[in-house]
Image (tube, rainbow, N blue to C red):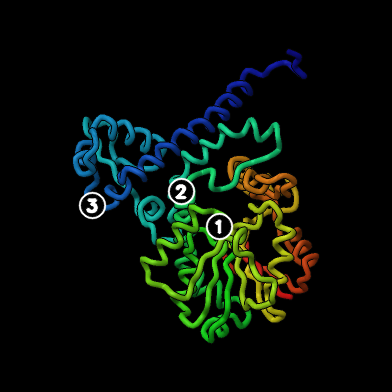
């Protein structure tokens, strides 16, 4: 071993601490997954006085000793709160903010979707050595049906609160078109949340959802039946391709262009499917033009680059010669250049506040 300089003992301790703090985060993320899966957060959110490990275990039908150790992790990680840890049976509770993030599925701050699919995401590590050697990744169906549910739970809380009242009115003339019977395509529709929301809100509109995940499409059909919505239809574009007949008034892509193996071709497809006076709503991850900018300006850059390896870029490289944009691969300037190359002439970022995503109005 050749070192560039002598080892600084203090720097060594701090570096080791930093490395193991990442492991702490990974293990605690697993505990958050369990808290969600076992209904522990939901139960705690309904308790006015707080819970001991015994009361929480009794109410959730779980073994007290396991619940106690889980609570100890959670209070050490400052996810649950206790006023006094020195007593024999501490009382634990969720703050009002924690209730929204951990146990309120219809609130836009709800954050359990990514933790729902954490086992599947981390399970992708088993596939990574071969992917690194061959260059070929794995699509979203490699994460199984729970992967599709996790995506649904990740993005729908915000969409359900803001898509109809905030996002769609920000697009020029789209609300009127939707009310008058617009034809809409949601490409990369997942389990159909946005498509079904638009279909129920605008009954005169016709909505087509496209996705290549069979798990997501099956879930979308199930939800469509449950909700009794008849103006929304779901398709796999590999068997029922998107028609390049300039027939759509609005095309939406929510958080999916960077996941695609051939986003350049998809943008050309969108242009071919869109009317000359139509609108493409492009929603994708906020990204900067370079690594140094992403690292300097995005405090979650390490998380997003890691998720890219395990999920987003893996999907984008799941076919030979995939373009491999990855999670932070579609900056505003790159998206604009690609859109203009595909035949669009108008590209504007919408003034919509979102912690992760940027929203663009794109037109021919």
Which mark sits nearer the N-terminus, 1 or 3? 3
Residue 128, relative to residue 211: is it above or below?
A: above
Mark 3: secondary structure: loop
Residue 23, relative to residue 211: is it above or below?
A: above
Residues at circles 1 and 2 in contact by the CB criterion of under 8 Å: no
Which residue is at the front of the view, 277 or 107?
277
**How many labels, in total?**
3
At horizontal 55% and vertical 64% (from top left) the residue drawn is: 235
Residue 180, relative to residue 121: is it above or below?
A: below
Q: Which x, y percent locates residue 195?
A: 50, 68
Which mark sits nearer the N-terminus, 3 or 2? 3
In the image, is 280 to the left or to the right of 159?
Answer: right
Q: Which residue is mark 3?
A: 48
Q: CA distance from mark 3 to mark 2?
A: 35 Å
Q: Which x, y percent locates residue 344?
A: 76, 71
Which residue is at the front of the view, 143 or 339?
143
Q: CA distance from mark 1 to mark 3?
A: 30 Å
Which numbered circle lies on residue 145? 2
Local crowd size for mark 3, using a 10 Å CA cut-off: few (<14), some (14–19), many (≥20)? few
At horizontal 55% and vertical 57% (from top left) the residue drawn is: 355
Q: Which residue is mark 1?
A: 355
Which mark sits nearer the N-terminus, 1 or 2? 2
Q: Which x, y percent locates residue 188?
A: 58, 60
Q: In which quadrant is the C terminus drawn?
A: bottom right
Mark 1: secondary structure: loop
In front: label 3 or label 2: 2
């Amino acid at each position: 071993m050749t070192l560039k300089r002598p080892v600084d003992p203090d720097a060594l301790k701090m570096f080791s601490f930093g490395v193991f703090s990442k492991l702490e985060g990974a293990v605690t993320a697993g505990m958050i997954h369990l808290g969600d899966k076992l209904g522990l957060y939901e139960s705690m959110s309904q308790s006015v006085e707080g819970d001991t490990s015994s009361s929480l275990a009794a109410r959730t039908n779980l073994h007290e000793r396991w619940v106690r150790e889980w609570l100890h992790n959670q209070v050490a990680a400052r996810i649950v709160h206790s006023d006094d840890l020195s007593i024999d049976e501490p009382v634990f509770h969720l703050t009002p903010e924690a209730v929204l993030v951990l146990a309120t599925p219809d609130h836009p701050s709800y954050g359990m979707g990514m933790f729902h699919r954490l086992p599947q995401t981390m399970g992708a590590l088993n596939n990574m050595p071969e992917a690194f050697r061959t260059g070929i990744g794995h699509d979203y169906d490699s994460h199984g049906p729970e992967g599709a549910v996790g995506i649904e739970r990740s993005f729908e809380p915000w969409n359900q609160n803001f898509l109809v009242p905030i996002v769609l009115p920000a697009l020029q003339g789209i609300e009127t078109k939707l009310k008058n019977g617009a034809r809409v395509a949601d490409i990369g529709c997942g389990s159909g949340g946005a498509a079904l929301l638009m279909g129920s809100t605008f009954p005169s509109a016709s909505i087509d959802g496209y996705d290549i995940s069979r798990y997501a499409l099956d879930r979308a059909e199930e939800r469509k039946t449950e909700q009794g919505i008849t103006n929304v239809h779901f398709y796999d574009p590999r068997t029922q391709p998107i028609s390049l007949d300039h027939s759509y008034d609005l095309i939406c892509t929510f958080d999916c262009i960077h996941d695609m193996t051939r986003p350049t071709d998809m943008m050309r497809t969108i242009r071919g499917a869109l009317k000359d006076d139509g609108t493409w709503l492009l929603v994708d991850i906020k990204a900067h033009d370079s690594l140094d900018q992403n690292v300097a300006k995005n405090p979650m850059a390490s998380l997003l680059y890691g998720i890219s390896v395990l999920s987003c870029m893996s999907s984008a490289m799941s076919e030979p010669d995939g373009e491999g944009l990855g999670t932070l691969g579609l900056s505003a300037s790159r998206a604009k250049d690609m859109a203009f190359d595909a035949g669009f002439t108008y590209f504007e970022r919408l003034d919509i506040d979102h912690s992760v995503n940027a929203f663009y109005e794109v037109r021919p």
